[in-house]
């Protein structure tokens, strides 16, 4: 395995060092079929360590979004195993609920409730799932909205905000559950180009604060600057994984080189 320093973000990208950290996500030989015909995940294994930022890249239809959606049971899988912070993912609803309390997710679409204010959107889950008193939930929500730079929007409704602002609300909403892991499924793909930067900057701040993150994205600049490790998927397989310097400058696999030639 490679060892070195990510020249852009200054993080130590030593795989030799990572096993000394706590394993937060352990996915082993994950396989999934759609309608028992289409083999969308063909035995994918990945371990993510505490505080690590892993970026998953790949062409459309490669299985990358499906893969991360198995981490919190939004997608079922038929073979293999997934362990999230010591909890083995199973079909038991209590087990799934326990994992979802520890895993926040931000989607391509913002999925905010249009009839609720921004503050109400962020406090909904902490009140109903974590059983926080309303006052405590609102205090946490306001701190998070300030953290993502939109505290002044708390009393507005989603339709009154820009796309970039709505996505930052979605990030605050996920953080309000105080998760141990954050999953991002192409969080900027539905945004106008001028709004992408504000969302990526929020994600960078989370990474700098030590949040464990798995990010499906095509944002090369973000991957270079923030990722500890980049994974390429194609055809339901994990093709290559390396730190950003190795991935972009010295890819080992021909499929990786072809992919990079199309996006760089």
Image (cartoon, rainbow, N blue to C red):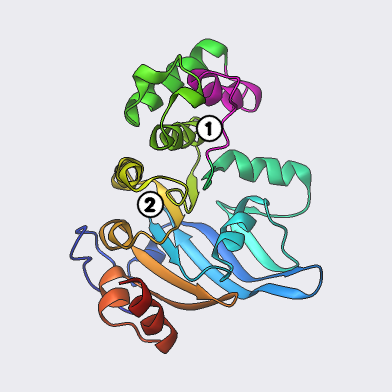
Circle 2 residue: 51
Q: Is residue 221 left or right of residue 89?
A: left
Q: State yes or no: residue 123 in magenta.
A: yes
Of the residues under marks 1 and 2, which one precedes in the sequence?
A: 2
Residue 155, quarter of picture: top left
Estimate the x, y position of residue 226 in percent, counting from the top left.
29, 56
Q: CA distance from mark 1 to mark 2?
A: 18 Å
For the point 33% across and 82% down, the residue is: 251
For the point 36% across and 20% down, the residue is: 151
- Taking depth in this image into account, of 241 and 34 the one nearest to the observer is 34
Q: Magenta stretch: give its range.
A: 110-132
Circle 1 residue: 177
Q: With respect to residue 70, does 138 lie above or below?
A: above
Neighbour class for label 2 at 10 Å: few (<14), some, many (≥20)?
many
Q: With respect to residue 126, does 227 lie above or below?
A: below
Task: Work out which quarter of the rendered image holds the N terminus and state it.
Answer: bottom left
Q: With respect to residue 149, does 4 lie above or below?
A: below
Task: Work out which quarter of the rendered image holds the C terminus and state it.
Answer: bottom left
Residue at disc 2, secondary structure: loop
Q: Is residue 153 left or right of residue 131?
A: left
- Taking depth in this image into account, of 60 and 51 the one nearest to the observer is 60
Q: Is residue 217 left or right of residue 14?
A: right
For the point 39% across and 83% down, the residue is: 258
- How many labels were placed on the picture? 2
Residue at disc 1, secondary structure: loop
Neighbour class for label 1 at 10 Å: few (<14), some, many (≥20)?
many
Q: State yes or no: residue 57 in magenta.
A: no
Estimate the x, y position of residue 42 in percent, counting from the top left.
65, 77
């Amino acid at each position: 395995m490679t060892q070195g320093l990510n020249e852009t973000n200054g993080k130590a990208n030593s795989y030799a060092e990572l096993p000394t950290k706590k394993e937060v996500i352990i996915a082993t030989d994950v396989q999934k079929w759609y309608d028992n015909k289409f083999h969308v995940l063909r035995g994918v294994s990945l371990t993510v360590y505490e505080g690590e930022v892993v970026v998953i890249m790949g062409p459309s239809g490669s299985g990358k979004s499906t893969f991360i959606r198995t981490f919190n049971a939004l997608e079922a899988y038929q073979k293999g195993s997934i362990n999230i912070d010591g909890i083995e993912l199973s079909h038991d609803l209590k087990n799934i609920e326990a994992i979802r309390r520890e895993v926040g997710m931000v989607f391509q679409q913002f999925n905010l409730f249009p009839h609720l204010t921004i503050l109400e959107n962020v406090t909904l889950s902490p009140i109903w799932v974590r059983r926080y008193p309303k006052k405590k939930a609102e205090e946490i929500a306001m701190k998070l909205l300030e953290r993502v730079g939109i505290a002044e929007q708390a009393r507005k409704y989603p339709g009154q905000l820009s796309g970039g602002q709505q996505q930052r609300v979605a990030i605050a909403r996920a953080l309000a559950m105080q998760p141990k892991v954050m999953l991002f499924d192409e969080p900027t793909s539905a945004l106008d180009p001028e709004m992408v930067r504000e969302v990526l900057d929020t994600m960078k701040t989370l990474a700098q604060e030590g949040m464990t993150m798995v990010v499906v994205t095509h944002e090369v600049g973000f991957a270079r600057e923030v990722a500890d490790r980049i994974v390429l998927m194609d055809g339901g397989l994990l093709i290559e994984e390396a730190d950003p310097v190795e991935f972009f400058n010295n890819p080992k696999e021909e499929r990786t080189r072809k992919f990079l030639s199309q996006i760089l």
